[in-house]
Image (tube, helix red, strand yellow):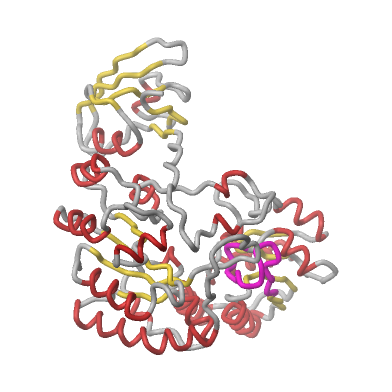
Amino acid sequence: MAGLLINSVTSGSIADELDVMAGDRLLNVNGLPLRDLIDYSYYAASEEELLLEIEKPNGELWELEVTRDEGESLGLTFTPPDPARCANNCLFCFVHQLPKGLRKPLYVKDEDYRLSFLNGNYVTLANLSRSALKRIIEQRLSPLYISVHATNPQLRERLLGKSGIPAILEQLEELAAARIIMHTQVVLCPGLNDGEELKRTVADLAALFPAVQSLAIVPLGLTAHRRKLPLLTPVNAEYARQFVTKWQPYAEVQRRKLGQPFLFLADEFFLKAALPFPPIKEYGDFPQIENGVGMVPLFMKEAAQLLRRASKHVPFRASVVTGVSSFPFVSVFLDKLEEKSDLELVPYAVENRLFGSMVTVSGLVCGNDIISALEGHETGAALLVPDVMLKEGEGVFLDDISLAELERRLGCPVVLFDSTPRGCYNTLKKLQKRSQ
């Protein structure tokens, strides 16, 4: 359908005063038709005088003239667009490795440059049309988050499972010439895009700095449900040790050469290798933190700051769940917080039974995994669950278990907390007040 469906209207806003309502459809702005949220933002961002065409649910058309102060919002929010589907067949695709029986949206592969701009989703650009590339440049859709994986064209086609795709370096060069900022990633597959191929990829992307602002190397994820798929080698502890030992010094060389941090190794490499993390200054402004780069060093820094001011509490017992990979540093933080606060804090590392033992991150822990790990255990005043384990805005784990069901099946209060040291501490303080 044409235009954008209005999801809500802010009370007291310009749109509210003009009797625009949820369920109406905004067709165009100043005579320009709207394809998506990006068009709306681009056409309506800076104009103080606007002509809006609204379609009511009964088909009635309204033309509304708007005069507003600079930067004043119209008060409209829109239903998010359905993402464009991915046409790749990546060797390491996580969606292809999901077990049966999960929610249907989890099996959807998206490859949408709009969501890269709006939400920071990574896209390969392998399915990008010339018209879409032109639009990115004309509307200044920057920054973008791009999965490169390899700059060798033949190897990239093999990794993406698709032939005849555009040459990624030519795409990146065109975007760089238009001053589009890009953050890039390589999903590392041992024996395929590491070694000399990785050197080539890093060199090619560094040559496009500062348009290409960062490059993250992240290990491939393999689940226990990888059936009838190409055989891939996992990143084990020994591989991770060798990789960090070789590539972290190279990242420091790149930082000195370019004048700022550029090449980043995902936290998972250091955790698997049991090697110390780089100094926190090596992460710059954390451009790849949503990609699992720098989350642990930042956690440890915030934990140290919080522990300096933590105070005594009325004693009580609480339990905290975490993924296997984050357990070592989370448990150290909780041990030190115990000493400072007189609380009894019990951490539990939850093994991932749904996806398999090779999946160790907290964000993929499921409700039934927690139940299996804690059934029969005394959790104390409450069980604390980090918010990264739940799907944002839906309040359920990946296996559709809700917090209420978790409470019922474990027979204890379950409390969600912001998955930072401060979030954990503040939640404990609230529980302490309730226990008085």
Give the side of residue 134 with respect to residue 284, left or right: left
Extreme right residue here? Answer: 376
- 219 or 413, which is in the foreground? 219
Look at the image and tell me whether residue 425 can be seen. Answer: no
In the image, residue 326 lies at what x, y percent? Answer: 58, 75
Give the side of residue 64 with respect to residue 209, left or right: right
Label count reads 0
- 209 or 76, which is in the foreground? 209
Look at the image and tell me whether residue 104 can be seen. Answer: yes
In the image, residue 260 lies at what x, y percent? Answer: 24, 76
Looking at the picture, does residue 261 appear above or below residue 229?
below
In the image, residue 336 lies at what x, y percent? Answer: 60, 84
- 66 or 107, which is in the foreground? 107
- Residue at 65% of width from left, 51% of height from top? 396
User: Would you identify the image quadrant in which residue 284 lies?
Assistant: bottom left
- Residue at 19% of width from left, 71% of height from top? 207
- Residue at 47% of width from left, 72% of height from top? 219
Looking at the picture, does residue 397 appear above or below residue 195?
above
- Residue at 41% of width from left, 48% of height from top? 111
In the image, residue 29 lies at what x, y percent? Answer: 26, 26
Quadrant including the N terminus: top left
Magenta stretch, residue numbers? 348-364
Quadrant including the C terminus: bottom right
- 287 or 426, which is in the foreground? 287
Q: How would you classify the magenta stretch by its main secondary structure?
A: loop
Extreme left residue here? Answer: 177
Residue 369 colored magenta?
Answer: no
